Amino acid sequence: MSGPALPGRVVALSGGVGGARFLDGVARALPPGALTAVVNTGDDFVHLGLHIAPDLDTVMYTLAGLADETRGWGLREETFATLAMVGLYGGPDWFLLGDRDLATHLVRTEALRGGATLSEVTARLSGALGIQTRLLPMADGPCRTMIDTLSDGTLAFQEWFVGRRAQPAVRAVHFEGLPPPAPGLIDAIDACDLVLIGPSNPYVSIDPILALGGVRAAIARKRVIAVSPIVAGRAVKGPLATMIHELTGQPPSAGAIARHYRGLLAALVVEHGDQGSLDGLPSLATATIMHTRDDRLRLAREVLAFAGALITKEPA
Amino acid sequence: MSGPALPGRVVALSGGVGGARFLDGVARALPPGALTAVVNTGDDFVHLGLHIAPDLDTVMYTLAGLADETRGWGLREETFATLAMVGLYGGPDWFLLGDRDLATHLVRTEALRGGATLSEVTARLSGALGIQTRLLPMADGPCRTMIDTLSDGTLAFQEWFVGRRAQPAVRAVHFEGLPPPAPGLIDAIDACDLVLIGPSNPYVSIDPILALGGVRAAIARKRVIAVSPIVAGRAVKGPLATMIHELTGQPPSAGAIARHYRGLLAALVVEHGDQGSLDGLPSLATATIMHTRDDRLRLAREVLAFAGALITKEPA
């Protein structure tokens, strides 16, 4: 018998930092062009007249090897001269716009104003940065992730996340505007051998993608493996642990992730020791926290080998 | 007899660098609030979706003490991180946008998009920089200085000046769109004791202001003194000397400036030795090149004293 077949074409869904790092590993573990990354744009917003796509930018910078890994967002060797001057003018300086980052927003916004779609601009920008992975924003049209809070009414994601530091307790999450999925997105899913869901926040990073017309149904026809963003009961980054508690009344656990994606997953990749709560869902337990670029590649290889073994085990 | 009366209220017309430096001297030579600066906006253009007002910015940065005096444009201690990244994306990097400068364009463009007028934004930005001089853009609406060239057809000013380095020979200059003068501009002229025309390019910096409805007529009722931007047959900065030759067939001289403003000037301030070509127009010959901030103040005091003497000499 031969070893497990590596999946040939892979679609991976991602939010920002954690998902981006996982994508970077998967991209490097696969042959060039084998990965299509589908990135959440529900957090996109207009700031100082600029179209800002935080998750798309994080993924782009991470895949290009330009991300600041220590700070966890933005570009390496970034400066903030524009932002300081905006503050001097009394302009809005709550969103930390770096000088180089600003170029992304300026060039993108100008292209969109000129009639290009977000998919087209994303292909152009990621190409200019030398990225070989196909990067798809989840949609070209606007979709806004809205946070219904207990104390402060309904807030757009960035208002809640950056503007209020994710402090107001979350009652529910909904999406305003459900544009068609980006051109080629459904086709990419249909043509793939494996769908991966990165270790991103399910409520605000993955659900917006799944909410778009036809996406969940297309994914449900495929082998889907997610990587848990909850490790030993805590979120690796961001407000997810608190959100799970607020939205489900349950403590945060890998099991909460498994239940959230119920009906969709063939397996969940969890941290060593986190298998207990999975109610029998197949799992791969390994070291899931990606401190280094080597960690990303190692995790991606393990997940792909695990997926290959799953595919091999079951009839086509 | 008392000495010559200093003019109480002064309006000064200005383009970029030379005019801005003169304004800085005049502002410091007069009591706070005595000067209204009227600045050319014919060079304004939209770049990367941003409303850029080169002369207004140069004046603002100069009056705020933030201008880079060595380079002759932009802000001191400026960086160009955004521009480098725009270039990496293959975006337009021919216009040298500094990182701090960019904040001016972002905040201005955002305010204009929000419904503020250019006058209102200018008051807000210059106030934030601590400028006490009243700064008026010549108009709130768009006026474009167009350069009719011999070789390259008609170009917008920045296309010609920056994009083609002012190389194509100029056949004529005209203005597209003549909006009403900025609110308060005509009133400021009507109420003033003296109009100064800074050492700016008459064709592309001062003529756009004079072309606006009612401005020339209002100025013609006042005592007007200009400072020659031509010194010993050469322009202190920029393409003016060549333009005079191309547009009038005459060699560049202070006399060419005097003839250009014919019927408007009570006197011209010229460099020592440049009085010869003035055809009897009253003049003040002094050192007009402003190397230092002290030079600006000295020149401004001389011009104001000269104006005071002229006013005292003639019947009201």
Image (spheres, coloured by chain):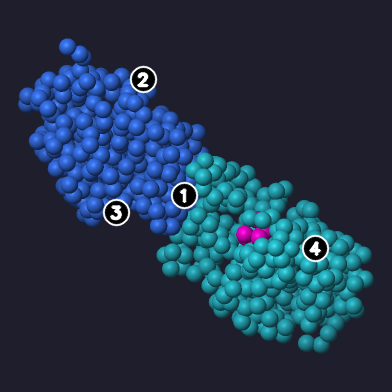
Chain colours: A cyan, B blue
Q: Quadrant of residue B218?
A: top left
Residue at numbered disc 3: B142
* Residues drawn in magenta: A158-162
Percent across and percent down for residue B56 are 35, 41
Mark 2 or mark 3: whose residue is earlier in sequence: 3
Confirm whether circles 4 and 1 share one chain.
Answer: no
Percent across and percent down for residue A225 are 78, 74
Q: Amino acid at mark 1?
A: Val
Q: Amino acid at mark 3?
A: Pro
Q: Is residue A136 left or right of residue B280?
A: right
Q: Are marks 4 and 3 in contact (CB under 8 Å)?
A: no
Mark 2 or mark 1: whose residue is earlier in sequence: 1
The Cα–Cα distance between marks 4 and 2, rounded to whole angstroms, is 63 Å
Percent across and percent down for residue B223 are 16, 31
Q: Amino acid at mark 2?
A: Asp
B31 vs A304: above or below: above
Residue at numbered disc 1: B107
Residue at numbered disc 2: B294
